[in-house]
Image: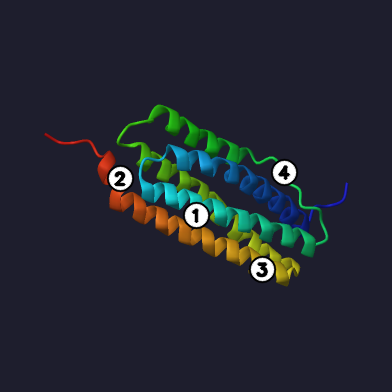
Amino acid sequence: MPEKTLDDLFLDTLKDIYYAEKQIIKALPKMARAVQSEEGKAAFLKHRDETDMQIQRLQQVFELIGKAARGKTCEAIQGIIAEGEEIMEEFKGSVALDAGLISSAQTVEHYEIARYGTLKSWAAQVGYADAVALLDANLQEELATDMKLTELGEKSANPKGAKKVA
C-alpha cells in the first residue's frame, strides 16, 4: 500500500467538510424555525445562504484539483447536529432555547473554522494556490458568523435565558 501524503490528507479533509456543509445546510432551516427571536431566525437563514455559497466554493476546489465533488461521512458534524436537535427538543418553548441554539451553531462554526484553517494551510503547502483564496473566503465567513453569533447571544439570548433571581 502506498504511503499516504499531505495531498491525500487534504483530499480526505476536503471531502469531510463538503459532507459537513451539506448536512449543515439541511439543519439551518430547522434551527431557523425553532429559534424564537427574529434576529436569530434571520441569522440562521443568512448563514444558510452563505453555506450554499461555501458549498459552491468547495465544488470549485474539487474542480481545481481534478477530483469529483464527493463527501465523506463526517461523524463529528453528525454528532454536533444531533446535539443541536436535542436542544431544540429539550428546551422547546423555554427562555433558554435561543441561547442553546446559538451555542449549537457556534459549535458548528468552530468545527468549520478548524477545518477551513487547516485546509487553507495545506492547500498552500501542496501547491493548490488557487484553492487557498476559495478556502480563505469560507474561513472568513465562518469567523464573521461566529462573531455575530457571540454578539447575538450576549445581547439578547443569554440574558433572556438566565434564571431570574428573587
Q: Position of residue 36 (x, y in %)?
A: 36, 40
Considering the image in quadrants, where does the C terminus appear?
A: top left
Q: Name the amino acid, label 2.
A: Asn
Residue lying furthest top:
90
Question: Residue at the spot x=39%, y=39% of the render?
Answer: 100
- Residue under label 4, please give it: 72
- Residue under label 1, please give it: 46
The circle on residue 158 is 2
Residue lying furthest left:
166
Q: Nearer the viewer, mark 3 or mark 1?
A: 1
Q: Name the amino acid, label 1.
A: Lys
Q: Position of residue 9 (x, y in %)?
A: 73, 53
Question: Residue at the spot x=59%, y=37% of the render?
Answer: 78
**Mark 4–mark 1 CB contact (< 8 Å):** no
- For marks 2 and 1, the one nearer the N-term is 1
Q: Nearer the viewer, mark 3 or mark 2?
A: 2
Q: Name the amino acid, label 3.
A: Val
Residue 130 appearing in the image: yes
Callout 2 crowding tier (Cα within 10 Å): few <14, some 14–19, many ≥20: some
Answer with left or right where residue 21 lies relative to residue 98. Answer: right
- For marks 3 and 2, the one nearer the N-term is 3
Residue lying furthest right:
1
**Secondary structure type for disc 2:** helix
- Residue under label 3, please give it: 132
The circle on residue 24 is none
Q: Name the amino acid, label 4.
A: Lys
**Secondary structure type for disc 3:** helix
- Identify whether 145 is placed above or below 134: above
